[in-house]
Image (cartoon, rainbow, N blue to C red):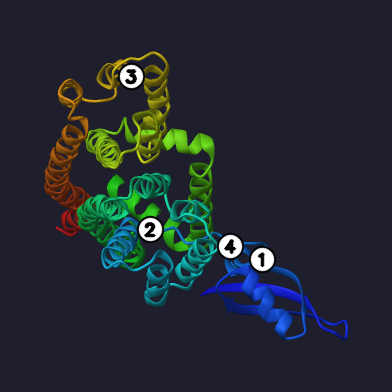
C-alpha cells in the first residue's frame, strides 16, 4: 500500500483534504467516490511532503548513506531470491524502515511499481535518494533477467564503500579529539589561570618579559572581548561554509585537497579507488562502457577529476581511443593503474582487472591512513607541548626575575 494525499469536494460543496492508503491513485479515487466525495486532486504523499507548503520543514528527500544503500540492496536481493514479487518485497521493507522519510520514499517507489512502472523507473523518480549507478544497474538487471545478481553486486559495492568511510572516520577521530582537547586546555589556562597570575606580577610593578606581556595581552583579549570574538568566529565559520557551498568554493576545495601535503596522496587514492570500483561493478553488470564511465565519474567527488573524465569519455566514445590511453592523456591516474587497465583491455578482462585495482587501492588507502594517524599523534603532542611550554615559560620568567630582585 502507498500513502496518497487528496483534495475532494463533498456533496454539500465543502472541500475535504487528507491522506489515505491505497494500491494506486485510481484505487484512492475509487475510495473517495465510495465516500460520496468527488476527487479533485490525488497524488503520492511524498509529492506534498517534498513541496513548499510548509516552510518550517525540510523538503529534500532523505539521502541514503552507503551503509543504508547496502542494506537496501542486500534485503531486496534476499527477498527476490525467495521469489517474492517487487511490490510485496517493497512492502515488507517499508514496514522495517526506521526513518519516516525513507518510509515515504519506499511507499512512493512501491506505488509506482504497482501502477506498472519498472523498478528502475520507480527508483529514478527519486534521484536525490537513489544514485544513478543504482538506477542504471537495476535497469540492466531487469533487461537481462539477473536482478538478484545485480542487487548482490550493488550490496557488495556499497558495503565496500561503507567500510572505507568507516576507516576514514576512525582515522580522523583521534586527531580531532587531540585538537579539541589541546585547544580547550590552552584556552582554560589563558582565560582562567593567567589573569590571576598577571595580577600578582603587576602588583610588584616590575617590567615583565616579552613572552609574559604577550600572554597577558592574549588573556585580556579573550576575557575582555569574548562577546565580540565569538560572534566574529561564528560569522567567519558561516561565511566559509557558505563560500564552500558555492561553485567557486567547491572548485577551491577540490584544488586545495589535491595540493595539501601528504593528504593529497590519500585523496588521490580514494578518488581512483571509487572510480575503479564503480566502473568494475557497472561493467560486470552489463552496462556499456560509455554509460559506465559517465556514472563512475559522478562518484569521484572531485571536480578536477570529473572535468578530466569528460575528455576521457569524449576520446573513448568519439575518437575510438582505448580507455588506458585516454586516461593516460589526462595525467591524473597513476601509471601502475594505467598498466593494469591496459592489460585488462588486451585480455578482455577489464572488469576483473578494475576490481583488482580497487581492492589494492583500498588496502593502500587504509595503510596510508594508519601511517598518517600514527604520524599525526606526535605532531599534535609537540604542538600542545609547545603551547603549554610557552605558557609555563611566560610564568617562570617573571618569577625568576622577581627572585633576582629580592636577592
Q: Residue at x 60, y 62 (%)?
A: 50
C-alpha gap between disc 4 and disc 2? 46 Å
Tag 1 and tag 3, C-beta contact below 8 Å = no
Q: Which mark is residue 219?
A: 2
Q: Residue at x 65, y 73 (%)?
A: 5
Using the image, determine if residue 352 lies above or below residue 39: above
Q: Residue at x 49, y 65 (%)?
A: 105
Tag 1 and tag 2, C-beta contact below 8 Å = no
For marks 4 and 2, the one nearer the N-term is 4
For marks 3 and 2, the one nearer the N-term is 2
Using the image, determine if residue 85 lies above or below residue 63: below
| Residue receiving disc 1 | 55
| Residue receiving disc 4 | 59
Tag 4 and tag 3, C-beta contact below 8 Å = no
Q: Position of residue 141 (x, y in %)?
A: 34, 48
| Residue receiving disc 3 | 330
- SS of the residue at dot 1? loop
Tag 4 and tag 2, C-beta contact below 8 Å = no
- SS of the residue at dot 3? helix
Amino acid at each position: 500500500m502507498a500513502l496518497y494525499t487528496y483534495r475532494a469536494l463533498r456533496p454539500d460543496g465543502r472541500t475535504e483534504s487528507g491522506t489515505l492508503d491505497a494500491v494506486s491513485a485510481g484505487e484512492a479515487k475509487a475510495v473517495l467516490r465510495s465516500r460520496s466525495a468527488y476527487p479533485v486532486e490525488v497524488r503520492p504523499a511524498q509529492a506534498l511532503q517534498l513541496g513548499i507548503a510548509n516552510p518550517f520543514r525540510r523538503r529534500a528527500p532523505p539521502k541514503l548513506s552507503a551503509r543504508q544503500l547496502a542494506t537496501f540492496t542486500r534485503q531486496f536481493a534476499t527477498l527476490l531470491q525467495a521469489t517474492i514479487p517487487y511490490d510485496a518485497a517493497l512492502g515488507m521493507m517499508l514496514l522495517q524502515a526506521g526513518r519516516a522519510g525513507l518510509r515515504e520514499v519506499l511507499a512512493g517507489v512501491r506505488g509506482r511499481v504497482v501502477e506498472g512502472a519498472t523498478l528502475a523507473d520507480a527508483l529514478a523518480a527519486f534521484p536525490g535518494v537513489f544514485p544513478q549507478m543504482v538506477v542504471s544497474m537495476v535497469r540492466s538487471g531487469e533487461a537481462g533477467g539477473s536482478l538478484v545478481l545485480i542487487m548482490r553486486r550493488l550490496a557488495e559495492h556499497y558495503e565496500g564503500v561503507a567500510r572505507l568511510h568507516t576507516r576514514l572516520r576512525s582515522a580522523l577521530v583521534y586527531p580531532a579529539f587531540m585538537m579539541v582537547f589541546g585547544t580547550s586546555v590552552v584556552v582554560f589556562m589563558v582565560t582562567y589561570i593567567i589573569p590571576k597570575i598577571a595580577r600578582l606580577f603587576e602588583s610588584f610593578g616590575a617590567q615583565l618579559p616579552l613572552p609574559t606581556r604577550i600572554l597577558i595581552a592574549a588573556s585580556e583579549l579573550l576575557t575582555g572581548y569574548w562577546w565580540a570574538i565569538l560572534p566574529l568566529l561564528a560569522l567567519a565559520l558561516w561565511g566559509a561554509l557558505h563560500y564552500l557551498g558555492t561553485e567557486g568554493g567547491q572548485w577551491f576545495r577540490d584544488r586545495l585537497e589535491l595540493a595539501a601535503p601528504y593528504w593529497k596522496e590519500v585523496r588521490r587514492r580514494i578518488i581512483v579507488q571509487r572510480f575503479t570500483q564503480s566502473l568494475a561493478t557497472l561493467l560486470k553488470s552489463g552496462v556499456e562502457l560509455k554509460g559506465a564511465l559517465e556514472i563512475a565519474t559522478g562518484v569521484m567527488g572531485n571536480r578536477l577529476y570529473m572535468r578530466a573524465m569528460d575528455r576521457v569519455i569524449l576520446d573513448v566514445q568519439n575518437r575510438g581511443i582505448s580507455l588506458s590511453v585516454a586516461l593516460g592523456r589526462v595525467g591524473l591516474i597513476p601509471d601502475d593503474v594505467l598498466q593494469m587497465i591496459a592489460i585488462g583491455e588486451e585480455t578482455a578482462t577489464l572488469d576483473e582487472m578494475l576490481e583488482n585495482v580497487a581492492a589494492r587501492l583500498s588496502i593502500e588507502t587504509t595503510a596510508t591512513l594508519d601511517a598518517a594517524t600514527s604520524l599525526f599523534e606526535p605532531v599534535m603532542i609537540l604542538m600542545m607541548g609547545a603551547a603549554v611550554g610557552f605558557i609555563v615559560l611566560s610564568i617562570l620568567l617573571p618569577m625568576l626575575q622577581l627572585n633576582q630582585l629580592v636577592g
